[in-house]
Image (cartoon, rainbow, N blue to C red):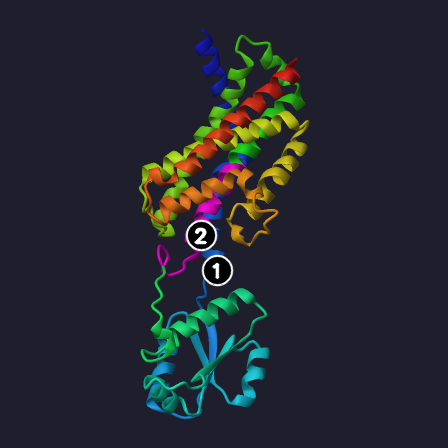
Amino acid sequence: MKKSNFQSFVKKEFLHIFRDVRTMMLVLLIPVVLMVLFGFAISTEIHNLNVAVVVPNKSESIRQAVNRLACNPYFTLVDEVANTDIDPVLRSGKADAVVVFDEDYDRILAQRNAGINTPPAMQFIIDASNTNVAQSGAAYLQQVLAENHTPQQLLNLHLLYNPQMKSAYNFVPGIMGFIFILICAMMASVSIVREKEMGTMEVLLVSPVRPFKIIMAKMIPYFMISCVNLMTILLIAHHLLHVPMSGGWWGIIVVSLIYLILSLTLGLLISTIATSQAVALLVSAMLLLLPMMMLSGMVFPLENLPTVLSPLPNIIPARWYIQAIRKLMIMGLPLSAVWREVLIMIAMIIVLLVVALKRFKDKLE
């Protein structure tokens, strides 16, 4: 009988969610929109850097260097300009960078090839009003224009795991952590608080089902919907954004399921703090979304934090999930390589669940 009552509560929650069209749109469509948006529209890669060149003479070596620049898909060769036109062409926005070849370009290259110290054979003048474009553009230009006999080639540079520096490789794990917090924590907390606001929680609590099972019945639908979102996100990431699943699908799924449970326990804890749906949304945003964006490593490198603040990211659940997913997806490590992150998330689940259930019980009394 108890099992039948519990199943009825779960069915009621599913029907309640499915009847709310706005909730279904939020839960099912936003993950797809965010993945596509961050995978294609929002990118830190440089795909079309407008470059002008200053060519003092038409030597063969300069011609080859300019051809390499023109043929590269990351650059658009806009014009050949004179030295006096460098500043106007940058100020007008016609070019993002100007490559200036030295008049003695051929002689400098020959002397460097002979081991003689010489001044640079070319210089890059880049509009640095956008620092991201400036840094990436300078690095790309240096790589494309480097000759076999220039100093850049004396250093062998190897980029591991993401040699093309695709931004989707960085954004996908972060967006996964963001989406699951959004769906599981925020939606679950609002669902429980809504019952309190409407006065129906008291009705549920006098039913034959224990309070713990009532809470679990409200969590299960969001967990199942999140599982659907998980598979949708993984398929989009792999087939549309071409993000590798180098560590294997099962490891990624196992770690993600643990994170889903962790997000649900966070939502349960928030529901014991909030007194209204508006407060639940505000608390979720202040305690989950903003810290996750700032301190999870999704956007900003954690290594840049001051020493005093460096322990703070350790209490952010998304930090450990994103770190584990990057190892599994991008680096191709097995599940055993992320045992530390998994254990930390499980420990967080236990602590949060105990605290949330205790607070929930105290409120009932």
Residue 170 badge = 2
What are the residue bounds of the magenta stretch? 160-182
Specify whether residue 164 is painted magenta.
Answer: yes
Q: Is residue 185 left or right of residue 251?
A: right
Mark 1 crowdedness (10 Å alpha carbons): few <14, some 14-19, many ≥20: some
How packed mark 2 is, by other alpha carbons closer than 10 Å (few <14, some 14-19, many 20 or more), is many
Q: Nearer the viewer, residue 184 or 228?
A: 184
Q: Where residue 251 sits in the image (x, y, percent)?
A: 34, 37
Q: Quadrant of the C terminus?
A: top right
N-terminal-most mark, 1 or 2: 1
Q: In the rendered structure, find residue 44 and report the number of the disc placed on it.
A: 1
Give the answer, above or below, for where 117 lies relative to 215.
below
Q: Is residue 110 visible?
A: yes
Q: Are marks 1 and 2 in contact (CB under 8 Å)?
A: yes
Relative to 78, say whether 199 is above or below: above
Q: Position of residue 141 (x, y in %)?
A: 43, 74
Who's the residue at 54% across and 84% down the image? 86
Where residue 213 appears, as percent x and y from the top left, is 51, 16
- The amino acid on which the numbered mark 2 sits, given as a three-letter code, is Asn
Does the magenta run of residues contain 318?
no
Q: Quadrant of residue 166?
A: bottom left
Specify the principal SS of the magenta part.
helix
**Of residues 43 and 347, the one drawn nearer to the viewer in this rendering:** 347
At a point 43% along the width and 75% down the height, the residue shown is 76
Q: Amino acid at mark 1?
A: Thr
Coordinates of residue 140 in the picture (x, y in percent): 42, 70
**Element carrying mark 2:** helix
Query: Closer to the camera, 361 or 18?
Result: 361
Image position of 273 (left or right of 261): right
Report the quarter where the N terminus lies: top left
Secondary structure beneath dot 1 equals: loop
Residue 25 visible, this orientation = no
